[in-house]
Image (cartoon, helix red, strand yellow):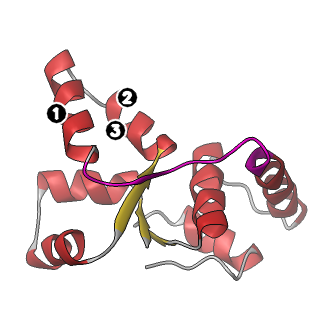
């Protein structure tokens, strides 16, 4: 399974290319709550919100359960103790991917930093 990051979805919506189209149509793609929230935050109207929700409804949504937040907190501690500072939402996405055995499809440089500490994180 591939957990797709917000920046990939935005790039796909703005300038889809054949490679992205192939991945979205042939691979097992998922989103998570943070990605949904970030995309909805960028909506410019209630119509945009409706379109975003409909577009994302075709993908399974991976989320953290109550005990996973402890893992996230420990991951944030481990990152900080290794001198790595990343946005909170990127740590949530990375933790969600690791817990669910998913790779992350992203163009965000923060995930390469996270991978230096968590070598089990798989980037697509």
Residue in the picture at 14% in, 21% down: 47
Q: CA distance from mark 3 to mark 1?
A: 11 Å
The disc placed on residue 10 is: none
Q: Kindly identify the residue that appears in the image at 39 percent across and 40 percent down.
A: 36
Q: Quadrant of residue 24?
A: bottom left
Secondary-structure class at tag 2:
helix
| Closer mark to the observer between disc 3 and disc 1 | 1
Q: Is residue 94 left or right of residue 68?
A: left
Relative image position of residue 37 (x, y in whole percent): 43, 34
Give the structural element (helix, strand or loop) at label 1. Answer: helix
Q: Secondary structure at mark 3?
A: helix
Separation of disc 2 and disc 1 at Cα? 13 Å
Q: Which residue is mark 2?
A: 41
Contact check, label 2 and label 3, Cβ < 8 Å? yes
Residue 96 point in image, percent of width and height: 61, 57
What segment carries the magenta color? 58-69
Residue designated by label 1: 51
Residue underneath mark 3? 39
Q: Is residue 102 above or below residue 34?
A: below
């Amino acid at each position: 399974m591939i957990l797709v990051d917000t920046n990939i979805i935005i790039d796909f919506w703005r300038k889809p290319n054949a490679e992205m189209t192939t991945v979205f149509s042939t691979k097992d793609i998922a989103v998570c709550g943070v990605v949904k929230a970030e995309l909805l935050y960028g909506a410019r109207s209630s119509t945009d919100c409706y379109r975003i929700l409909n577009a994302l409804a075709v993908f399974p949504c991976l989320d953290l359960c109550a005990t996973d937040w402890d893992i996230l907190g420990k991951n944030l501690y481990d990152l900080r103790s290794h001198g790595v500072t990343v946005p909170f939402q990127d740590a949530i996405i990375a933790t969600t991917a690791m817990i669910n055995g998913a790779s992350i499809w992203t163009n965000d440089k923060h995930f390469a930093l996270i991978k230096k500490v968590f070598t089990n994180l798989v980037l697509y």
